[in-house]
Each structure stands twice: as C-alpha cells, then as structure tokens.
Image: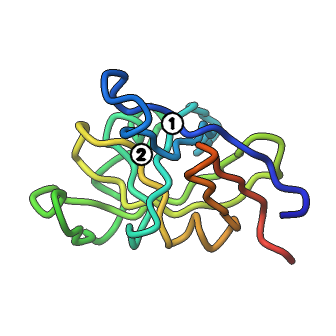
Amino acid sequence: MRNAERFALTAAQRELGAASLMPQLSLTLTHHGRSVTALGLLDTRATVNVLLYRIGLELGAVWEPQGRSLRLSGNLTQFEARPLLVSAVVSRFAPVRLVFAWTQADNIPVILGQVNFFMEFDVCFYRSQQAFEIQPKAT
C-alpha cells in the first residue's frame, strides 16, 4: 500500500501470546476543543464505530441533547447509544471526521467499524507477520 503506515498487532492477553493478537490503533479524538487519546480495536465485522461512555464525557459530550437513540447488536444490545461526531487523528495522517455510536457501556474497547472508520481508511492485515497497515482513502 502506498503511503501506508504499518502497526504491530498487540496481545490482548499476554499469557496467550500470538493467539490473542489484535489490531489495535492509538488515535486522538477531539470534540468541542477537548482531546482524548484512545486505543481502538479495528473490527471488520462491526457495522459502526463504538465509543465508551467515559470517553464521550471526557470529550465534553452531554448525553441528553445528543438526539435519537441508536440500537446496537451483539453484546451491546442492553446499552443505549447515541450518535456522536468527532474529529480523529491517526498517526501522521490528516484529521478525519468519525461518527460513533456513543454507548453507555464502559467495559468494551473503542471499536472502529465499517461506518465510518473503514470508509475513511484502507486497511490491510498481515496476520502471519503480526502486523497491519492503514492509509487514508484515495481522494
């Protein structure tokens, strides 16, 4: 991939070693002048990006006026979620706008899904090399 940056997969559970390697990515999220650095899990099966309640609060978001509620699936069906638009910086790349399902759950990772992380970045996984590469979408 041209202009791509390579990242190592990280172990989710040290005792499992290579069996627990996950594509996790550090990114800086900004909303209304407040910034937070978060670790996001790239999840090609996730329909949407998901943001933890605590991180939304750290960004200065207020739950009530966020508008309509979103319905999540899987292990997040029991939690309410609201749409939240933030600016995100990944590595050396220019900022992008990411929309998150801001959920009241706090016991999950930040999830980077199809809408809209994978719409903004091309990603290539090299599991045998314990790495992945990303680059911004071609404009």
* Label 2 vs 1, first from the N-terminus: 1
Task: Kindly report the distance in space between the C-alpha atoms of the residues bearing marks 2 and 1.
Answer: 7 Å
Type of amino acid at the residue the image marks with label 2: Val
Find residue 131 and report its image quarter.
Answer: top right
Residue identifier under label 2: 110
Name the one closer to the observer, 64 or 111.
111
Horizontal side of 136 relative to 23 (left or right) equals right
Q: Position of residue 138 (x, y in %)?
A: 84, 75
Look at the image and tell me in which quarter the C terminus lies: bottom right
Horizontal side of 50 relative to 30 (left or right) equals left
Q: Position of residue 106 (x, y in %)?
A: 25, 38
Find residue 126 and report its image quarter.
Answer: bottom right
User: Which element is circle 2 on?
Assistant: strand
Residue identifier under label 1: 39
Horizontal side of 59 relative to 47 (left or right) equals right
Q: Residue furthest bottom?
A: 139
User: Dot 2: within a 10 Å radius of its alpha carbon, few (fewer than 14), some, or many (20 or more) residues?
Assistant: many
Q: Position of residue 4 (x, y in %)?
A: 82, 55
Q: Residue furthest top?
A: 15
User: Residue at coordinates 18% horizontally, 58% vertically from top-left?
Assistant: 76
Q: Position of residue 97 (x, y in %)?
A: 65, 61
User: Residue at coordinates 63% horizontally, 37% vertically from top-left?
Assistant: 8
